[in-house]
Image (tube, rainbow, N blue to C red):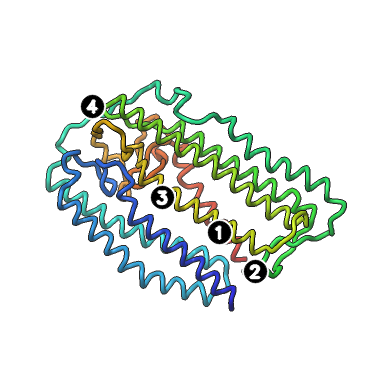
């Protein structure tokens, strides 16, 4: 009973975070992109845009309250781990539908105002992606990569002194709920950590590879902002990788009996880390903005970009342009990058997460 309540509380925390991010995302994107639609710079303060945003916030709140109540109840009465994960994705889908509604309003407003007739241009700096200062050095990832190697060495060294099976799962009350063969666990945790480092290193490389948008009126200032933006997220990704491996190392050592204490302390540290990761990412997104567009730098900055809405599909969330050689590009809604599904490899990267999610839900529901 108590474990069910804890699970509902954890899911409730996730729902609230998703709702906050959903409401704040329009404040993180480039100023000349509103709900995924490019608009002229001089229309940023248009009262009709502000009205669309106010309604968008209200819709998110009023739709989320009953949705969260129903999904939380489903989580509580279900004993399936698959349902716990499924409810989160259902809520994400609900939020996306609300976004699509706002995106559709923006499309109609742009057509009504004939903003698409405004000619704008984009500049691409071919030297930008080759500049060393764009990203931090890849060698920094040796730090999180060394941690699992050391863990594996320590585990193999202590293996002969350990029992055949060791605790690896605990309930919210700190009671042991699962065991694993010692030999398997000694390899499992370091391999998990190596996989995490590999994933974050790939994200680090995407940051460097992704296509940049540079203002034709302020090219030098635009490049400067983009470099700060990419370096900030590159450092954030590295720090996150180091901390994840340190926290999982504590769990690894606790399972091996190398450290003593309460598992609740490790759970608390993990929860604090999750909160810090979420809060810091939101703060960075608001302060820096997409592509560094919201950085407060001395000189006045103006965004100028080409009107490429025709290449964006499904509420301007999917980029499809077979003629664009870029594989990774800036997202239209939010902060970060997405793929060009107009290229075969881009389509593969787009489909892959859904395959992984589906397989994960199937496995945990067995």
Q: Earlier in the sequence, mark 4 or mark 3?
A: 4
State the image quarter where residue 141 is shown. Answer: top right
Location of residue 251 in the rendering, given as x and y in whole percent from the top left corner: 68, 55
Q: Secondary structure at mark 3?
A: helix
Give the label on residue 217, or none.
4
The N terminus: image quadrant: bottom right
Give the foreground label among 2 and 3. 3
* Residue at image point 36% right, 28% down: 224
Secondary structure, mark 4, is loop
Dot 1 lies on which element?
Answer: helix
Gap in angstroms between the C-alphas marked 2 and 4: 58 Å
Q: CA distance from mark 1 to mark 2?
A: 15 Å
Q: Which residue is mark 2?
A: 171
Tell me the distance, in whole angstroms, between the alpha carbons under discs 4 and 3.
Answer: 29 Å
Q: Nearer the viewer, residue 22 or 232?
A: 232
Q: Nearer the viewer, residue 108 or 150?
A: 150
Mark 3–mark 1 Cα distance, whole angstroms, equals 17 Å
Q: Quadrant of residue 231?
A: top left
In this orientation, which residue lies closer to the viewer: 56 or 172? 172
Q: Is residue 95 left or right of residue 186?
A: left
Q: Which residue is mark 3?
A: 282
Residue at the spot x=50%, y=50% of the render?
277
Can you tell which quarter of the image residue 138 is in? top right
Q: Is residue 72 left or right of residue 99?
A: right
Q: Mark 2 or mark 1, which is nearer the start of the sequence?
A: 2
């Amino acid at each position: 009973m108590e474990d069910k309540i804890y699970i509902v509380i954890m899911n409730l925390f996730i729902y609230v975070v998703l709702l906050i991010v959903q409401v704040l995302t329009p404040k993180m994107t480039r100023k000349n992109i509103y709900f995924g639609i490019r608009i002229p710079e001089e229309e940023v303060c248009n009262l009709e845009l502000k009205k669309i945003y106010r309604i968008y916030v209200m819709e998110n709140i009023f739709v989320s309250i009953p949705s969260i109540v129903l999904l939380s109840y489903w989580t509580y009465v279900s004993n399936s781990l698959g349902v716990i994960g499924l409810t989160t994705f259902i809520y994400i889908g609900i939020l996306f539908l609300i976004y699509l509604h706002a995106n559709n309003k923006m499309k109609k407003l742009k057509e009504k105002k004939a903003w698409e007739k405004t000619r704008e241009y984009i500049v691409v700096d071919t030297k930008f992606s080759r500049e060393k200062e764009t990203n931090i050095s890849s060698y920094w990832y040796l730090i999180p990569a060394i941690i699992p190697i050391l863990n594996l060495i320590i585990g193999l060294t202590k293996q002969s002194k350990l029992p055949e099976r060791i605790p690896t799962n605990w309930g919210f009350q700190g009671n042991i709920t699962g065991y694993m063969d010692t030999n398997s666990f000694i390899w499992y945790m370091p391999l998990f950590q190596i996989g995490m480092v590999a994933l974050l290193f790939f994200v680090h490389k995407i940051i460097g590879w992704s296509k940049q948008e540079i203002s034709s009126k302020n090219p030098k200032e635009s490049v400067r902002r983009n470099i700060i933006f990419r370096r900030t997220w590159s450092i954030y990704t590295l720090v996150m990788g180091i901390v994840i491996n340190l926290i999982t190392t504590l769990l690894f050592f606790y399972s091996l009996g190398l450290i003593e204490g309460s598992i609740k302390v490790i759970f608390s540290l993990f929860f604090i880390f999750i909160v810090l990761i979420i809060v810091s990412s939101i703060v960075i997104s608001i302060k820096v903005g997409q592509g560094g567009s919201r950085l407060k730098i001395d000189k006045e900055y103006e965004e100028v970009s080409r009107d490429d809405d025709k290449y964006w599909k499904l509420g301007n969330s999917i980029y499809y342009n077979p003629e664009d050689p870029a594989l990774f590009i800036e997202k239209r809604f939010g902060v970060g990058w997405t793929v060009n599904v107009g290229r075969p490899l881009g389509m593969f990267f787009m489909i892959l997460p859904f395959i992984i999610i589906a397989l994960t839900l199937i496995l945990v529901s067995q």
